[in-house]
Image (spheres, rainbow, N blue to C red):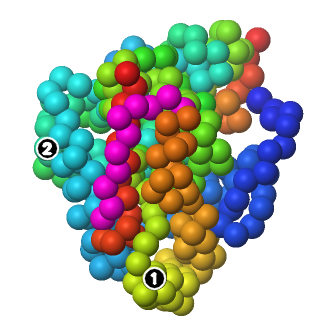
Amino acid sequence: MIENTHQDNTSFGYRTVTEQEKTGLVKEVFSSVSSKYDIMNDTMSFGIHRVWKDALVDWMAPKDKTSCLDLAGGTGDIAKRILKRNAGVDVHVVDLTPDMIFEGRNKIGLGSTNQPVSWIVGDGLQLPFKDNQFDYCTIGFGLRNFRNYTNALKEIYRVLKLGGRLLVLEFSNVPNESLRQLYDSYSFKVIPKLGGIIASDVDSYQYLVESIRKFPGQEELKELMAETGFENIRYRNLSFGVVAIHSGWKI
Amino acid sequence: MEEERKFDRHMLEILVCPLTHCQLAYDKEKQELISKAANLAYPIRDGVPIMLPDEARTVE
C-alpha cells in the first residue's frame, strides 16, 4: 500500500540493493530456511548459538509482570528462554516472515511452558504498536537483516517505555587477527556448503556469511544506538567477538 | 498442532495500525483487523495477525 518514494540503497550480503528489495529478499531467505533453521543453527555453530541466546536472557534478567517485544523472534528461541526464566513476562513475538512465526508457535506450544505468547507478523520498521508499550525489546540475530539499522533502532526506541531496555544479540567482529582468519575461512568455505547439504540452499547461507561481515562492529553499533537516543549502552563479547550483546536503555 | 488457531482478542489491547497508529476493529467473520484511518484490512491467518500494509486489503 505505502510506496517508498525515495529509493535508499542498502546491503543484501555483498550486493547493493534498494531497501524495498532487501525486505523481499530477506523474506525469501527465511521462508526458504524456516523448517531447517534450528538444525542449521546447531550444525553451523556446534550448538553454541544456544549458549549465546542463554547469555542474552541472563543479562536481561527479566522482571515479573513486565512486557517484552521479541523482534525478529520467529522461531521462538528467545521467547522460550525468557518464559523459562520468568513466566511472569508478557512476550510478543514479531517477525516479518509468517513461516518463521508458525514454526515458532508450533515449537513453543509443544514445550513445557503453557504461557501464552502473542505471535504477530510485522515489519520492524513499521511496528503495529503505540508509543511507550514495552519494558524490554530483544532481538536475537535479527537486526542484521533489517533494511535500515538506524530506522529500526528508532522504531524500537518509540515503542519502549521510559525506563525500557533494548538487548541486541548479533554477530560482531573478532578482534584477534589469527582467530579471525580461522573464523573467516570456516564462514566462507564451510557454512554455504552446510547450507547446501542440510537446507538445500547455498544462496541463503552465502547471504548469511556476507551479511555478518557487513554488519557494524561492537563500537559502531554502540554509536548507532547512542545516536538513536539510547543511554547507558554497554556490550559484551561472546566467543571472542564472533557475537556480541549490546544493551541500552530509554531513559 | 493441526487445528485452526483462534485470534486472541487480548491482542487488540496492544495492536494498532502500523501506518497510522490508530486502533483496529476486529472482524470475526472475515478474520481481519480493520484500520478505518488507513482504509486497510489486515488479514488474520490461522490466528496470527499479518500487520503488513503491503499485504492488507483496501477497504472503503
Of helix, strand and loop, which one carries label 1? helix
Asked where in the image residue A189 lies, by quadrant, the reply is bottom right
Camera sees residue A232: yes
Q: Nearer the viewer, residue B18 or A251?
A: A251
Asked where in the image residue A134 lies, by quadrant, the reply is top left
Circle 2 crowding by C-alpha within 10 Å: few under 14, some 14–19, many from 20: some
Relative to B48, does residue A79 appear above or below in the rendering? below
Relative to B55, does residue A197 appear above or below in the rendering? below
Is residue A131 in the magenta section? no
Q: Residue at x 50, y 49 (%)?
A: A221
Residue A245 in the image: state x and y as whole percent: 35, 53
**Alpha carbons under labels 2 and 1: distance apart:** 37 Å
Which residue position is annotated with label 2? A85
Q: Which residues are the magenta region? A: A228-238
Q: How many marks?
A: 2
Q: Residue at x 60, y 76 (%)?
A: A206
Q: Quadrant of the C terminus of chain B?
A: top right
Q: Which mark is residue A177?
A: 1
Instruction: Tell which subunit mark 2 falls on.
Output: A
Q: Amino acid at mark 2?
A: Arg
Of the residues under marks 2 and 1, which one precedes in the sequence?
A: 2
Residue B13 in the image: state x and y as whole percent: 39, 14
Residue A73 in the image: state x and y as whole percent: 40, 47
Q: Residue at x 14, y 27 (%)?
A: A64
Q: Amino acid at mark 1?
A: Glu
Instruction: Tell which subunit mark 1 falls on.
Output: A
Please state if A232 lies on the left or on the right of B25 as rendered: left
Camera sees residue B8: no
Circle 1 crowding by C-alpha within 10 Å: few under 14, some 14–19, many from 20: few
